[in-house]
Image: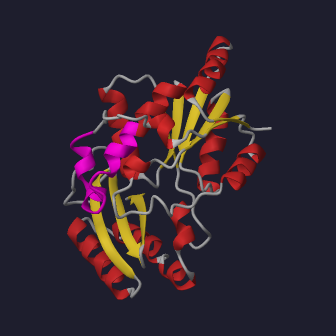
Amino acid sequence: MVQVVKTIAGLRPLRSKLREQKAKVTLVPTMGALHAGHLSLVQQAKKISDYVLVSIFVNPTQFGPDEDFQDYPRDLNRDLSLLEESGVGLVFIPEVAEIYPAGFQTYVAVEELSQKLCVISRPSHFRGVTTVVLKLFNIVQPESAAFGQKDAQQVVIIRRMLKDLNLDVELITCPIVREPDGLALSSRNRYLNEAERKAAIILYQCLQWAKQRVEQGEACSEGILQGIKGSIEREPLARLDYAEIVDAENLSGKALVEKNSLLALAVFIGKTRLIDNMVL
């Protein structure tokens, strides 16, 4: 049966015991509302480590004032059932006050990388992400941590933080898991009504179209991006947040599609903001 720990004080002796056993621990940080994408991270973590620890924490500092923190899907009983079926032994589920005690005022920001892509509509998002991830690394002290490629900017930022702060944690990046029609799995897909769910496939269609154009010899980023913007505009339920082709390592814009070019999209489907990406 999966063991649930809600406090840092309760977690530390368990972590010390694993250290004594010389067990390699992989952390899978989540905000709950688990789906097959999260479970793929668990399965990858099991392949490379002796022990998988999953955290479930809806982190308030990565939500803006008008975002969906209160409405973010939460289904703890289902999450724990899925993790138990997946063979996870320990789940860390802290309260907000455990992570951000009264008077908390210390944040971590990866300055330049956080000012790209998602900064357009989520200006403070990554300061909250890097702060909570660093705290989880300090609390759990894992040898490695697993993240999904769907959040490509997040992966780049965390990799930079690990390097800049000399953190001895191996970053494991796992492929995007998709629905049969190509929609990337996301906890926020639950917000979509039937018509919006059908419209949401436009993200994957745009990625596939761009891939085909590149395979046919198109190298001009602007031409590809204009085609994507036109497709988004023709979908009545979709509104483009951004479409950019950037270097997959440093997120700098690329005028030409070449090796290691990342096409990143953020699109509002109704009121729900979805992201997706593909290395071209």
Residue found at x 52% / y 24% = 141
Q: Nearer the viewer, residue 113 or 209?
A: 113
Q: Is residue 220 visible?
A: no
> What is the quadrant of the C terminus in the image?
bottom left
Which residue lies most toward the top here? 20
Which residue lies most toward the front here? 102
Give the left or right position of residue 189, taking residue 130 as reference: right
Q: Nearer the viewer, residue 36 or 187?
A: 187
Tell me which secondary structure the magenta stretch mostly adopts: helix
Asked which colour scheme the image uses, the reply is secondary structure
Measuring from the top left, give residue 50's x and y in whole percent. Answer: 67, 26
Q: Is residue 121 above or below residue 97?
A: below
Q: Is residue 57 above or below residue 159?
A: below
Instruction: Count every numbered label the image shows and give the total.
Output: 0
The image quarter containing residue 104 is top left
Q: Is residue 3 visible?
A: yes
**Magenta stretch contains residue 92:** no
Q: Is residue 77 above or below residue 215?
A: above
The image quarter containing residue 84 is top right
Residue found at x 25% / y 76% = 226
**Magenta stretch contains residue 127:** yes
Give the left or right position of residue 39, taking residue 58 as reference: right
Measuring from the top left, give residue 230's x and y in whole percent. Answer: 30, 82
Q: Is residue 271 above or below residue 35?
A: below
Measuring from the top left, give residue 266's x and y in whole percent. Answer: 36, 66
Residue found at x 22% / y 41% = 111
Which residue lies most toward the left here? 255
> What is the quadrant of the N terminus in the image?
top right
Measuring from the top left, give residue 155's x and y in whole percent. Answer: 40, 44
Query: Which region shows up in magenta?
Result: 110-131
